[in-house]
Amino acid sequence: MRVFSSRADRWRGILVLLLVTAAFFALYVAVQRYAPFVFRAAELRAWIAQFGVFAPLVFVLIQAVQVVVAPIPGQVVALVAGYLFGPFWGTVYSLTGVLIGSAVAFSLAKRYGRSFVEDILHEDVVARFDDFVETVGVPGLFAFVIIPGLPDDAICFLAGLTSFRLRTFIAVISVGRLPAYVITVYAGGELASGRFIQGIALIGVVIALSAVGYYKQEAVRDAVARVESRLGF
C-alpha cells in the first residue's frame, strides 16, 4: 500500500514528523524546567485536586469538544485522563465526554440536515461512509465503532442523518467505544504509577489496532456490511 502519492509528499510527511517530534521535545524540556511536578503523578494529582469539581468538568468538556471539532485524537485525551485521574475515574470522565460530544454531533446533524454535515466533514469521508451508515443496522454500527482508528467521530454526524434514534445511537457508542478507552485510560494509569513497560505495551496495542483500522477503513466497512446482510439484520 502506498502511503504517499509522491516523493515530495513523502519528504513533506517526514518533515512534519520531525517538527512534531522537536516540538514535543521542546515542550518536555520546558515542563521539566518550569513545572517538573507534572512528571510526578502524585504531586500533579494533588495540584489538580485543589480545583475541586472544576478539574473533571473541564476535562469532560475537552473530551466532548474533540468529538465535535476533532483537533485532538480522543485516545490521547483518554491517556491523559488515566494519568491524571486514575483508571476508574479517568474512564468515567473520558466516556462521559465522548457520549456528550457524540450526542451533540448526532443532534446537530439531525437538526440542521445534510448540507450542514457536508460543510463539517470532508467530502471524501461523506462519499465513503454515507451509504454505509444509512443502510447498516445497530449490530453493524457497533462492529464499526468498536475498532479504533476508524472515523467514528464522523459517523456521529452521519448517523444523525439516518432514522436512528438518539438513545439507540448513544447505547451503541457507549458500549462500542468502551474497550479502546478502557485500555488507553488504564495505560495512562500505568504510566502514572511508574509501570512504564506495561503502559507503553498497552499504548502499542491501541496504536497497532488504530493503524489497522485507519488503513483498512474500506475493508472493515465492506466486511461489516457483508456480515450484517448475511445475518439478516
Image (cartoon, rainbow, N blue to C red):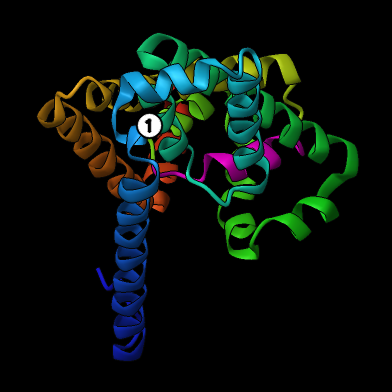
Q: What residue would you read off at disc 1?
A: 79
Question: In this view, which residue lies farthest toward the right?
Answer: 112
| Disc 1 packing (10 Å; few <14; some 14–19; many ≥20) | many
Q: Out of 90 and 160, give the one closest to the viewer.
A: 90
Give the percent coordinates (x, y) of residue 184.
33, 28
Q: Quick check: 193 above or below 206?
A: above
User: What residue lies at 32% left-to-right and 39% top-to-bottom?
Assistant: 36
Where residue 154 sits in the image (x, y, percent)?
Answer: 61, 45
Q: Nearer the viewer, residue 205 or 225?
A: 205
Quadrant of the rendering where the C terminus is positioned: top right
Instruction: Pick whichever, 181 or 187, lies toward us.
Output: 187
Q: Is residue 219 left or right of residue 130?
A: left
At 84% from the left and 55% from the top, the residue drawn is: 115
**Range drawn in magenta:** 149-161
Q: Amino acid at mark 1?
A: Leu
- Residue 190 seen: yes
Q: Is residue 206 magenta?
A: no
User: Could you tell me which secondary element the residue under label 1 belongs to?
Assistant: helix
Using residue 55 as the reference point, say whether residue 80 is left or right of it: left
In the image, taking residue 166 as reference, residue 219 lies left or right, namely left
Residue at the extreme top of the image, as rendered: 88
Say if 208 sits above or below 29 in the image. Answer: above
Residue 94, percent across and down? 51, 23
| Residue 151 drawn in magenta | yes
Q: Residue at x 18, y 35 (%)?
A: 200
Above or below, comparing residue 101 to residue 131 in the picture: above
The quadrant where residue 39 appears: top left
Measuring from the top left, give residue 27's x and y in whole percent.
37, 56
